[in-house]
Image: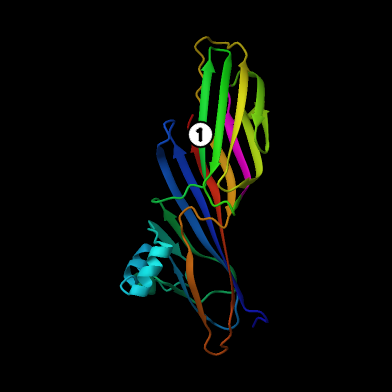
């Protein structure tokens, strides 16, 4: 028994991305988790629904639910796995997730999505090698999520040649520093507003190479970030029904979304 019946739902997604030098997406996918923390009295029967495309196409047979389909939009889930408390037969028939939750924290569902991914950040890199002793770098980062949201703990790792001697950096936001041990400029932005763009420029002077044939392999730019209340897959919790016939209480439900970088890279 709990004096306060509550359930916390966290949708946590990792987005993986690889973009070519021409801006084409070579690889992109989202792996997500639905994490629950339950403080519910008795043995409640829960029914959980997301904006799964197959479910919403089925519901769209009625006029009222057709309007819902247009407003929310369905997502196509490539594969998913469930906690052992989920009744898999029910999911196969009507695409809803029915379960009796254990007390405390557990992972209700894991899923993967490869189509129609909402990228939270876009990177536009420009690298010019001026002769053998000078490199000019310009990196523009754009946030594509809504202006009411904030990206947090954003870090952009910009590779530099191994023989960099002097590095002069200018950035519009945050702090950037050349780190010789990493052969990279690390640009950190604690709070990145939505619908915004910022540019970093760097001028590198290179020392004379030991080998005249030595070339810079140009590793990709990589990013780390966290964007609360944003999902790259577009997944949304549509409903959570909790029924406890014996106790008949009204539970308090909390939902949070967060997207983070997995392997997020742009080739230069």
- Say how the picture is coloured: rainbow
Q: Which of 34 and 76 is in front in this view?
A: 76
Residue 213 rendering spot, x and y as whole percentages: 49, 11
**Do we see residue 62 in this rendering?**
yes
Q: How many marks?
A: 1
> Is 136 or 217 nearer to us in this picture?
136
Q: Was residue 228 drawn as part of the magenta stretch in this picture?
A: no
Residue 4: image location, x then y, percent: 66, 79
Residue 89 visible from this viewpoint: no
Q: Magenta span: helix, strand or loop, mainly?
A: strand
Left of 29 or right of it: where is 248? right
- Image quarter for residue 229? bottom right
Farthest residue to the left: give it.
61
Tell me: residue 234, above or below residue 26.
below
The crowd level at tag 1 (other Cα within 10 Å; few <14, some 14-19, many 20+) is: some
Q: Give the range drawn in magenta.
A: 151-161
Q: Provide residue 245's location: percent of width, then percent of height.
A: 52, 88
Q: Residue at x 61, y 31 (%)?
A: 200
Q: Is residue 189 left or right of residue 216?
A: right
Examine the image and state in which quarter residue 157 appears.
top right
Quarter of the rendering occupied by the N terminus: bottom right
Residue, disc 1? 124
**For the point 40% across and 61% down, which residue is it?**
73
**Secondary structure of residue under mark 1:** strand
- In the displayed orientation, state which residue is furthest to the bottom: 246
In the rendered view, tell whether residue 129 sits above or below residue 14.
Answer: above
Tell me if residue 20 comes above or below residue 145 in the rendering.
above
For the point 66% across and 29% down, which residue is it? 170
> Residue 209 versus residue 178: which sits nearer the camera?
178
Percent x, y of residue 69: 38, 66
């Amino acid at each position: 028994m709990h004096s306060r019946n509550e359930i916390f739902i966290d949708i946590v997604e990792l987005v993986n991305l690889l973009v070519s030098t021409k801006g084409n997406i070579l690889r992109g996918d989202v792996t997500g988790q639905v994490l629950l923390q339950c403080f519910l009295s008795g043995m409640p029967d829960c029914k959980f629904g997301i904006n799964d495309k197959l479910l919403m196409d089925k519901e769209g047979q009625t006029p009222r639910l057709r309007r819902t389909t247009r407003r929310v939009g369905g997502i196509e889930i490539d594969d998913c796995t469930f906690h052992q408390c989920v009744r898999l037969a029910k999911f196969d028939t009507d695409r809803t997730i029915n379960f009796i939750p254990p007390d405390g924290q557990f992972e209700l569902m894991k899923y993967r999505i490869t189509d129609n991914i909402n990228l939270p950040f876009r990177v536009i890199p420009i690298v010019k090698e001026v002769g053998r002793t000078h490199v000019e770098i310009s990196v523009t980062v754009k946030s594509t999520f809504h202006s009411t949201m904030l990206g947090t703990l954003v870090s952009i790792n910009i590779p530099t040649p191994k023989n960099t001697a002097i590095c002069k950096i200018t950035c519009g936001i945050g702090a950037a520093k050349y780190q010789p041990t990493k052969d990279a400029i690390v640009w950190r932005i604690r709070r990145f507003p939505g619908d915004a763009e910022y540019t970093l420029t760097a001028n590198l002077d290179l020392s004379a190479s030991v080998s005249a044939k030595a070339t810079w392999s140009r590793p990709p730019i990589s990013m780390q970030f966290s964007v609360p209340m944003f999902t790259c897959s577009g997944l949304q919790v549509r409903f959570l029904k909790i029924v406890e016939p014996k106790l008949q209480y009204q539970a308090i439900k909390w939902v949070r979304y967060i997207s983070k970088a997995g392997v997020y890279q742009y080739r230069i």
